[in-house]
Image (cartoon, rainbow, N blue to C red):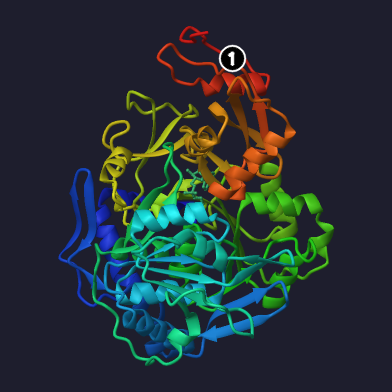
Amino acid sequence: MITNKQFQKIYAESIQDPEKFWANVAETTIEWFQKWDKVLNWEFPNYQWFVGGKLNATYNCLDRHVKAGLGEKTALIYLNENNERTTIDYQNLSKQVNKFSNGLKSLGVKKGDRVLIYMPLVIEQIIAMLACARIGAIHSVVFAGFSANALRERAESLKAKIVITATWTLRRGKKKLLKPVAEEAIKDLEFVEKLIVLNRDKNETSFINEREIDFYDLLNPQSEICEGEVMDSGDPLFILYTSGSTGKPKGIVHNTGGFLVYAQYTLENAFNIMSDDIYWCTADPGWITGHSYVTYGPLAKGLTVLIVEGVPDYPKPDNWYKIIEQEKVNIFYTSPTALRMLKKYGEEYCKQHDLSSLRILGTVGEPINPEVWKWYYEFIGNKKCPIADTWWQTETGGHMIMTLPGLEEKPGVAGLPFYGIDVAIINQAGEEMPVNEKGFLVIKKPWPGALSDCWNNSDRFIQYWSEIGKVFFTGDFAIKDADGYIQILGRSDDVINISGHRIGTAEVENLLVSFNGIVEAAVISKPDELKGERLKAFVVLKSNIKGDNVLKLDIQKYIKTKIASFAVPEEIEFISSLPKTRSGKIMRRILKAKELGQDVGDLTTLED
Ligand code: WT7
């Protein structure tokens, strides 16, 4: 645990000379095959960290621990709804990863090729990610809740050579099929050379054509030895798609060196890590948290990582507490949306279990409501665990603003900027806001975890650094108090955060207008007790079409098959026209103000 005085001292040093600071961190966290020549190369808007440094992410996550004599330490504990429990130690995980790496190589996968992973949270998913990293292939994990259409869009954008899937995932006692979705997605995509399928049934899987191959048929015959590719610090490690304010998700690219240093170092600090910790982050690798804090950060640190294929409240509302007790979890990192749900079930479920193994708690994804924070502290943490509220984004690669264990905690307020992170809260003109006044949250300088590009869309990358002045524009509103603590006030752009998942209103609107019969659409968010926010769509229909409940359901189904269920507007209202400016821009703020019964504000630009 750190004191405020210690923190302030390190922070001041890190801001004074960030390159010296990060050089020291990079040297102590990661094993490099070759040291870098230059800590940072920054030629606006491009930057690269640890220039000339050579490393391999998988080597750092596995081999170095085995070499250090930790081969028999458990790397992963896997649990599912059927009470199945599988563990794998560092030695065996390393062997499996090497075999799968060789399997990928045998299919012709080379450094720089894109591999799309559409799998549930199982050990094989982590194996697939680490195997890609080992041979220098760029993985892109797509959350298993996404539709065939969304998967196809990503496969096309990446020109993915390989897609890896599983036959199904288990959710609330039901099998949700994944292989047919993957098959549908890549049906006529000729650049996809193989579909690798993890068969989760004892019996044979039926393969529809010679493009498909079984995960273990590929893995089993291979050698346990696979030399890792020597990667440049600036070589891409992975691409992860996320919604923005335009109609298409963007592929956020993260580089090997900077990302790995940042993921491991932020993890160590945020959770005050001890080497024997049993660590549980409830995220899925379909999102950034599952990359930085389920896979790369904790494995690079050599922790025992718990992964659970399941939901908090199935089979019973005490499921997660049961797991914490059974596995003696020390570090527990989850989202406000999950906590709101657990709080709603009530603390009697917490009290049924011994949660005394917990030492540090964490939260991420949305602002946490102060009353939920207090409940988390009291009933899960038993009033003895610090809560690390961690603010960050897909683009930032790791934690940026947080409350480190030991520092004063302010429920609902994310915390202080992390070491080396130079933040400001500014107005449209780029001027810094006074204390306690709302503005745009920006980061003034690159940090090692920062995205390095947007896949096939460098203009979009540059936009991050040129929205207002030459700083990184986060898209969040925030205020800073007199102690320097930063409170996040939600998005400033047209992005909505539903249960911690990002969705751009434009993405949903584009789909709505592609639905037969819809002329125009506008999507807004409304506060939601459980999900944080939910979507409402205003839809203008062709004059000959009647808006009724059947049509609503059809529209909802359509969005689900085009994106995923979290993107479906719960409410749809049919209206005759949308409020617009004279230049034709939809004024969503008017719809929102009217919907929430607020003052609609200045209407001078309104056309009608
Ligand atoms: C957006 C990023 C970072 C992993 C999960 C989401 C919101 C994230 C917090 C927090 C308040 C938060 C922001 C941010 N957000 N963490 N601790 N307090 N808001 O990643 O999908 O890239 O979304 O999530 O609005 O911009 P993401």
State the residue at coordinates (78%, 49%). Answer: 344
* Quadrant housing residue 328: bottom right
Across and down, in percent, residue 465 comes to: 29, 39
Q: Residue at x 52, y 59 (%)?
A: 143
Q: Compared with residue 520, is residue 563 higher up or lower down, i.e. above or below?
A: below
The answer to whether one can see residue 468 in this image is: yes
Mark 1 surroundings: few (<14), some (14-19) or many (≥20) residues within 10 A: some
Q: Quadrant of residue 109?
A: bottom left
Residue 343 % position (x, y):
75, 51
User: Camera-side residue: 339 or 457?
Assistant: 457
Instruction: Say which residue label 1 marks.
Output: 600
| In the depicted structure, whether residue 106 falls above or below residue 506 | below
Residue furthest front in the image: 544
Image coords of residue 533 (percent x, y): 63, 39
Does residue 367 appear in the picture of this structure?
no
**Residue drawn 64% across the image and 18% down it:** 594
Q: Residue at x 41, y 55 (%)?
A: 154
User: Callout 1, which amino acid?
Assistant: Val
Q: How many marks can you see?
A: 1
Q: Position of residue 335 (x, y in %)?
A: 61, 53
SS class, disc 1: loop
The answer to which quarter of the image holds residue 600 is top right
